[in-house]
Image: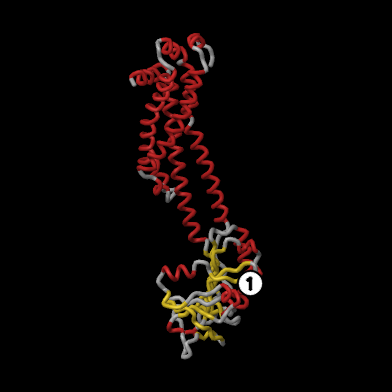
């Protein structure tokens, strides 16, 4: 340890430029690495916010009454919606989690309305994959059984009903059709999409994606609804440019991470020149009995003694000065940082530097003879 401190003191006194450059290198690389961690966290949070607002694409079928200023149903029917859904290209339906349809059905006496939650693909209508699970986990199932795949795909006259929907015959009336309740639920009833009469009026449709749809998907989806319903449908206000921002932000993140990796090895590159200045001193140490292993350990230890305190100071500067300024631009960046994260960042940085220094010192010590180092030959 005494030799390490002596080397650092010699570096400060006789190689001041390299000493200052080393300090600046550690500060710069550690700050960039910490920023990369925060940028990644902000990216993830922004992505979650983006996803939660952009995966569900709503279409409503109300129009404004010119006389009263109120909203009236536009007259869109279930059969028209079926034609619209089946006209969509497979690329538009890719990654759709479910389609939710709300009907105007006052005759079924349901205060919560009537819904169909389903998927469509390969010419087959199937119930939403998560519907039964959500009903059971939410404690909404009172009695009965769930749909079979065949019942749903063929539009069997069955329904998941609430108690107040039952008529005197124990059936559920929707338009001019009666559906048999196979499961009693509370509070949200559900009917197979094809079981609902074709002339039943639709209030709104929500197309739910697993991930934010691309600009091409979103445009094609809205074109399909516009072509099918014209002025009778209100299209969602979704800015296509937000999709481009999503991918641009992803690219910025990748660049930041690459910069952090490159910056973390700066001190290793810099130390190469410092060790060149010391090759005569290394020869003298080895002539006096210093083993190659001890020589490598001495130089690696010197880099660690410099790097660890400097990284700690830069982390303190980042947390107290830089981070509050960045939080004004990146609103979620502060959520990334904790004592554990700083410790992980330090471990990664020191690990990379130690590995690089060990490889560099091993090359300097093992590949050069004592005679050549004493003579000051170029490495």
* Location of residue 137 (image quadrant): bottom left
Q: x and y percent of residue 231 in the render?
A: 61, 74
- Foreground residue, 248 or 177? 177
Instruction: State the image coordinates of residue 237 (x, y, percent, origin top left).
Output: 54, 64
x then y, percent, for residue 3: 36, 18
Q: What residue is at 65 percent from the left and 70 percent from the top?
A: 123
Residue 370 in sight from this viewpoint: yes
Count of labels shown? 1
Is residue 69 in sight in this rendering?
Answer: no
Q: Is residue 301 above or below residue 188?
A: above
**Side of 112 relative to 75 (left or right):** left
Give the residue furthest to the left. Answer: 2
Check disc 1 and report the residue beneath it. 84
Residue found at x 53% / y 43%: 254
Mark 1 lies on a secondary structure that is helix
> Horizontal and vertical percent for residue 173?
52, 86
In the image: residue 87, left or right of residue 11: right
The one of 69 and 328 positioned closer to us in this rendering: 328
The quadrant in which the N terminus is found is top left
Residue 30 in the image: above or below residue 376: below
Dividing the picture into quarters, in which one does residue 291 lie?
top left
**Disc 1 residue crowd, few under 14, some 14–19, many 20+, Cα 10 Å:** some
Q: How is the image coloured?
A: secondary structure
* In this view, 279 is above or below 253: above
Q: Who is closer to the viewer here, 214 or 20?
A: 214
């Amino acid at each position: 340890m005494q030799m390490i401190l002596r080397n650092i003191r010699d570096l400060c006194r006789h190689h001041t430029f390299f000493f200052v450059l080393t300090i600046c290198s550690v500060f710069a690389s550690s700050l960039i690495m910490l920023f990369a961690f925060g940028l990644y966290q902000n990216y993830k949070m922004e992505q979650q916010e983006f996803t939660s607002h952009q995966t569900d694409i709503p279409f409503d079928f109300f129009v404004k009454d010119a006389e009263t200023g109120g909203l009236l149903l536009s007259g869109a029917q279930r059969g028209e919606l079926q034609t619209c859904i089946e006209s969509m290209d497979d690329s538009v339906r890719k990654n759709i989690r479910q389609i939710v349809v709300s009907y105007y059905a006052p005759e079924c006496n349901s205060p919560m309305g009537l819904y169909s939650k389903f998927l469509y693909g390969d010419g087959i209508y199937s119930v939403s994959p998560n519907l039964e699970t959500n009903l059971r986990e939410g404690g909404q199932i009172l009695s009965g059984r769930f749909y079979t795949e065949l019942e749903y795909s063929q539009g069997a006259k069955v329904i998941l009903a609430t108690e107040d929907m039952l008529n005197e015959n124990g059936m559920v009336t929707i338009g001019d059709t009666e559906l048999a309740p196979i499961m009693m639920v509370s509070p949200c009833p559900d009917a197979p999409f094809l079981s609902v009469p074709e002339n039943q009026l639709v209030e709104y449709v929500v197309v739910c994606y697993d991930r934010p749809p691309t600009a091409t998907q979103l445009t094609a989806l809205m074109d399909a609804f516009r072509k099918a319903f014209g002025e009778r449908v209100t299209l969602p206000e979704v800015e296509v440019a937000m999709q481009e921002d999503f991918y641009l932000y992803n690219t910025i993140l990748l660049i930041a991470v690459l910069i952090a990796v490159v910056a973390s090895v700066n001190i290793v590159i810099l130390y190469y020149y410092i060790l060149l200045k010391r090759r005569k001193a290394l020869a003298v140490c080895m002539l006096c009995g210093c083993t190659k292993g001890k020589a490598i350990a001495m130089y690696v230890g010197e880099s660690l003694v410099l790097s660890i305190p400097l990284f700690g100071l830069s982390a303190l500067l980042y947390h107290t000065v830089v981070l509050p300024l960045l939080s004004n631009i990146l609103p979620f960046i502060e959520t990334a940082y904790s004592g554990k994260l700083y410790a992980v960042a330090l471990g990664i940085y020191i690990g990379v530097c130690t590995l690089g220094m060990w490889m560099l010192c091993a090359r300097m010590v093992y590949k050069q003879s004592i005679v050549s180092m004493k003579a000051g030959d170029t490495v």
